[in-house]
Image (tube, grey):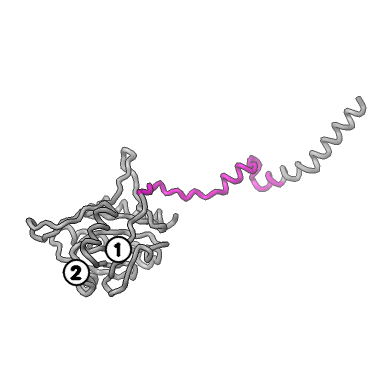
Amino acid sequence: MKKSYIGLAFIILVFGIIFIPKIVNRISNGTVVQGDRLDAVSNHKNSDTGLMKVGPAPKFVLTDQNGAKISNETYLGKVYVVEFFFTTCPSICPIMNKNMVDIQNEFFGNPNFGIASVSINPEHDTAKILKEHAEKIGVKSSNWHLLTGDKKYIYDIANKGFNLYVGENKNITAGFEHSGLFALIDKKGNIRCRKDKFNNPILYYDGLDAKGVKAITEDIKKLLNE
């Protein structure tokens, strides 16, 4: 019986030497409830933006308004927006251009943000024409590239790569047709989007509507902080 008391006293002494200083330290630091696993969770920074990854953006190499070769790799490390347009468009393009200028101005000076505006009438929209158009609409960012190249190549990027419709239509005044949607690309080259009220991915953002522009602006901010 005496030996049992001695053994119990020894265990209590060891416990006091090893664990009491740790408990006191946790109390003084306000972390008394944190074990090793809880520490790991509480110290983990949640970088989930809630935005879905649609898939990788298509690869491309095109020429911008300054005659420089621009590719998808030019934008790696940047969040960027892609649109398809043409300079002589009399209908939706001026609205898209205006909204894109607003987006540019919101993030102007941020080296991690860019824009790619791809012409679907590259035979007319040469680098020279695109440069004039850039000045006309108010392009100021060095990371906003208005792009031209081979027509079939561009149409494949739009229709097959992004699945954003572009085409020729001789029955309309402008001769070309396209969607008014903006694609949002993250720093790693993935197409990203938010979900609708039914929890379905929206895929792309309405570049003609104030709500769409507001939504993509909010989500650009999220991706810049990701």
Q: Which residue appears farthest toward the top when viewing the image?
A: 1
The amino acid beneath tag 2 is Asp
Residue at 24% in and 70% down: 134
x and y percent of residue 180 in the render?
Answer: 21, 54
Under tag 1, what secondary structure? strand
Q: Position of residue 17 (x, y in %)?
A: 81, 43
Residue tagged by mark 2? Answer: 125
Q: Closer to the camera, 216 or 79? A: 79
Q: Residue at x 32, y 71 (%)?
A: 69
Residue at the disc numbered 1:
116
The magenta span reads 25-54
Q: Nearer the viewer, residue 57 or 133?
A: 57
Image coordinates of residue 206 in percent, x first then y, are: 25, 51
Bin the neighbour count of mark 1 within 10 Å (Cα to Cα): few under 14, some 14-19, many 20 and up: many
> Where is the C terminus found, in terms of image quarters?
bottom left
- Tag count in the figure? 2
- Report the front residue among 46 and 176: 176
Query: Disc 1 and disc 2: Cα gap in Å?
Result: 15 Å
- Above/below status of 219 relative to 146: above
